[in-house]
Image (tube, grey):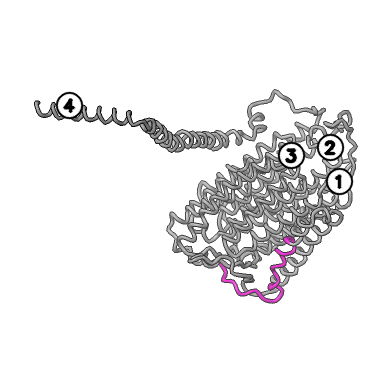
Amino acid sequence: MTEPVAASGIASLAWLLLALPAFGAAVLLVGGKRTDKWGHLLGCATILGAFGYGLALFFDTLGQSGERTSELFLFNWIDVNALKIDFALRLDPLSLTFVLLITGVGALIHIYSVGYMAHEEGRRKFFAYLNLFVAAMLLLVLGNGFVTLYFGWEGVGLASYLLIGWYQYKPEAASAAKKAFLMNRVGDLGLAIAIFMMFNRLGTTDYTEVFARVSEFSSGEVLAITLLLLLGACGKSGQFPLQAWLPDAMAGPTPVSALIHAATMVTAGVYLIARSNPLYNLSEDGRLVVMIIGAVTLLIGCIIGCAYDDFKKVLAYSTVSQIGYMILAVGLGPIGYALGIMHLLTHGFFKAGLFLGAGSVMHGMNDEGNIRRMGGLAKYLPITFVTWTLGYLALIGIPPFSGYFSKDAIIAAAFGAEGWRGYVFGGVALLGAALTAFYMTRLLILVFLGKPRWKELKSEDGREYHPHESPLTMTIPMIILAVGSVGAGWWFASGGRLAGWLEPSLGELKESHGVLSHGMVGILTVVLSLVGAGLAFLLFGRGKQPVEAPLRVSFPVRAARADLYGNALNEALFARPGTWLTRALVFLDLKGVDGLVNGTAALLGGSSGRLRRLQTGFVRSYALSMLLGSIFVLGALLVVRFS
């Protein structure tokens, strides 16, 4: 980990990256309805301003020699006894890469939202939430320590809750927002405990000091910390076993799906592991668990994606799967850190474009999301079709599109893992590539190709479908993202450009020497992708497709439609035991603790009431009592005397 220097020059204004979107959110939330007419313009302007400054900061850092790492101190944040935390920003290649991704793709999604949310009441509040999300995400990646990261981490959780639950009058949206919030709290607990362990051992949580002193941790502590950090990553990035919230979050508006679940929030877990690479380098077992989680998750996402008929949910499970590739990559250690970040960047282009394309289709189809009710839309939405298809080709890894350069590199690196790991993880990654091509081709056929099944149908509210192309505010961002889907991967990979740029933050990218060469892996991946796509054409590209999903299906299809029983498993293992424990504690509190306290009070009250009856106020009663007492005492004395 590089020792930072004090920020100077243009970097001394890096606080603007946080201030601009935070200012936009504050104005729109405090200003209320008075900002309705121009709120969306302010929301877009603040993000464009942050992107412009981030671009200038990137080129300024790129022109520097040496380690290109600096810190900007802003103020003393926490100073309580031994806990001393400064609010400071770390400017290095890794954080600046995320800054450009967050603000660049975020700006395009803001512009897209102008058209998509044009008829929504309270649109300025939506843009306020978007600004708040971007500000929190920037704080997460720019913070100079784990506590600052955690502050942004929780801010992202709050903003995502507000955005997912935008249609709060819909029960499914309100439920999805709560589910996302609660499941993320499980991961956040793991991250918090890891931070506590670091402070307990080192007395600091700043990246520079923690990573410079990692040798002071015992092997057990390093393993525990890396696993707890992984738990936090699983929550934010929708990885097994905390992946169930991400597909349900599609209940929010499509721009939310693109911003949170394609390019930014779900990549936070990948950032956390990559940033913590000095810790993971010391724990081979920790990295192995990371690889297992990534491999399991990518298969889960692929399998479930094959069976869903909801447009955005298929893309959501595709995101689960692709994040699994990234987690697998960073779990490989020095041979995979930079590759995971490269796939994260290319994924930001093509997946955001795919989500925005889905929103464009739904915008022209009366918000219809069932792909079985579509078909033949390429003729009616030509720009959406072309841009979406370019993103599709990038996702399934067809050369020369961007996914080919990033995903294939991860598969080759997986085969480069030592011993049996290379065969297992490389094989799983290859299988995932074939399944990805299958379900994405199915999506392409049912939405854009074939006969228009929607012509004889009506929407749920009785309106007929009249598909049409989206306005320029929506199509221009899609076109720009499509350009990135085509060329970003080649540009990042050419000459090791991205790996060299990230070296001060992630270390040198080591070459992997696996059972299969990189060229052979590339050929295998393309062949398997073509086989998966061809199989989808055979099954769905010929004949008339039903407008409703068949009810009688095989067990694997039923299991996939039920999310591989992930929700049922979580309910059985966590929700129900938690409910039973809560009920038991409530019973213990009511009948045990409250019963003891109330019973003691009742005993004392009842006893005092009965004793009070002895005080009658009549002298003859007291005299009779004294006489009886005297007789009793006298009798007792006589018994003792003559016994």
**Answer yes or no: do the residues labelled 1 and 3 have beta carbons within 8 Å?**
no
**Mark closer to the observer (2, 1):** 1
* Quadrant hosting residue 318: top right
Whether residue 406 is in magenta: the answer is no
Q: Which residue is mark 2?
A: 449
Residue range (magenta): 1-22
Question: Residue at point 46% right, 60% down?
Answer: 200
Closest to the observer, 623 or 354: 623
Q: Which residue is mark 4?
A: 635
* Element type where label 2 sits in the image: loop
Lower position in the chain sequence, tag 4 or tag 3: 3
**Answer yes or no: do the residues labelled 2 and 1 have beta carbons within 8 Å?**
no
- In the displayed structure, would residue 10 be above or below residue 30? below
- State left or right for residue 96 relative to residue 579: right
Residue at far top of view: 552
Question: Residue at point 73% right, 25% down?
Answer: 550
* Three-letter amino acid code at the position of disc 1: His
Q: Which residue is mark 3?
A: 533
Real-space CA distance between mark 1 and mark 3, rounded to the nearest whole angstrom: 38 Å
* Element type where label 3 sits in the image: helix
